[in-house]
Amino acid sequence: MSPAVEYLDDPPSLVLQSDAVQEKDNNAKTSAFKPAIATETVSCPICKSTDFYPVCESGDYEYVLPGKFFVVRCKSCNLFLQNPRPPFPEILRYYTEKYEPFRKVGSNLVQRLRNYVLGRHRTNLYRKLVAPNGSIVDVGCATGALLRDLKKHGTWQLTGVEPVPEVAEMARSTGLNVVTGVLEEANLPSSAFDLAIMNHVLEHVPDPSLVVRHVVRILKPGGRFTGEIPAPVCLERILFGKYWGGYHLPRHLTFFGPSQIKRFLENHGFEEVKTTGCIQPSNWLLSFSNYLKATNPPLIQKGWFSPHNFLLLALSTPFAFLISLFGLCPIIRFSARKPE
Ligand SMILES: [Zn+2]
């Protein structure tokens, strides 16, 4: 893709400064990390089109690892996706030991409070989708935080699937039943589960259709499928452009909006597909943090701004509530049913 392309998401006044600052920062901090090159082109996973509008050229602002990545929008179905993108094994290098979902919950009180509130909220939601004695699989369970909440507050039969062996072992060490591997290679039995959960996973996988076909296979007839995904049709992306936390490049590959996830799941035979916005104020702070890391690194380095800052979280919560009233949340939750 030519660097001369005019990207829809790039605020021009920010681009020159941020690129220069980030390049300098990258050179200083991550000189040993060899950037992945976007060489692989893909077609739209929903409509198979190869015709795209450019959206933005962006980078890994969250972990400040080097590399230039590209987001486009399908001209046919409006799906946002990373294209071209590095080959998947190259992208895996960007999941370093600092990658937050792979780390144990630390002593940070705000993180623990947030996880507690989110865990209780999700448990109450899943209680409406599955009977008390039902079977639940959490695909991409990471260290098992959600499964532990479900175990603590319910009587379900629980299974986790986690592709990273060390992370799966961390989950198993807390007494959970966790299979190591990606879903398509985990050899889970067919028609075995009442509920499949996939929170913040679908956007990471190189072939979402392959994964969802396996979700259909392992669900019982009438079983439910739910998950959370970053949705690009949100005020946050409009305001922050290429610094939007939901891009999370190069780890996120596909960005389904409400109408795209509905069409995608219906293409795979699901019915009763619904979406709702998730109120998660920390996502706003992540986008803001990305922007500051690129434009004003000293502010971040001095610790004056953090997505885990209690005061900032408290201040951004009413704003996140307000945005949700207009259907412009940066994260959406989908729910669907496999036909009987
Ligand atoms: Zn498409």
Image (cartoon, helix red, strand yellow):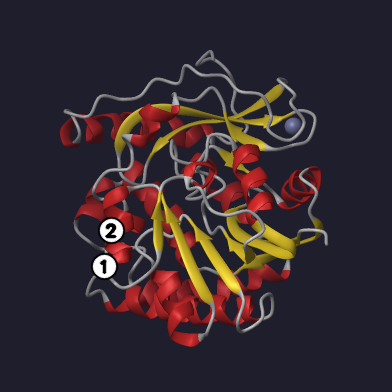
Image quadrant holding the C terminus, namely: bottom right
- The quadrant of the rendered image in which ligand 1 is seen is top right
Q: Where does the image place residue 76, in percent across and percent down from the top left?
A: 80, 30
Depth check: 255 or 263 in front?
263
* Circle on res. 53: none
Q: Quadrant of residue 174?
A: bottom left
Q: Where does the image place residue 70, in percent across and percent down from the top left?
A: 52, 28
Q: Where does the image place residue 182, in percent across and percent down from the top left?
A: 46, 45
- Whether residue 103 is visible: no
- Whether residue 214 is visible: yes
Q: Where does the image place residue 235, in percent across and percent down from the top left?
A: 63, 55
Q: Which residue is mark 2?
A: 169
Q: Is residue 197 left or right of residue 146?
A: right
Image quadrant holding the N terminus, namely: top right
Looking at the rendered structure, the secondary structure element under dot 2 is helix
Q: Amino acid at mark 1?
A: Ser
- Mark 1 residue crowding within 10 angstroms, few (<14) / some (14–19) / many (20+): few
Whether the residues at callouts 1 and 2 have beta carbons within 8 Å, the answer is yes
| In the image, residue 129 above or below residue 225 | below
Q: Which residue is mark 1?
A: 173
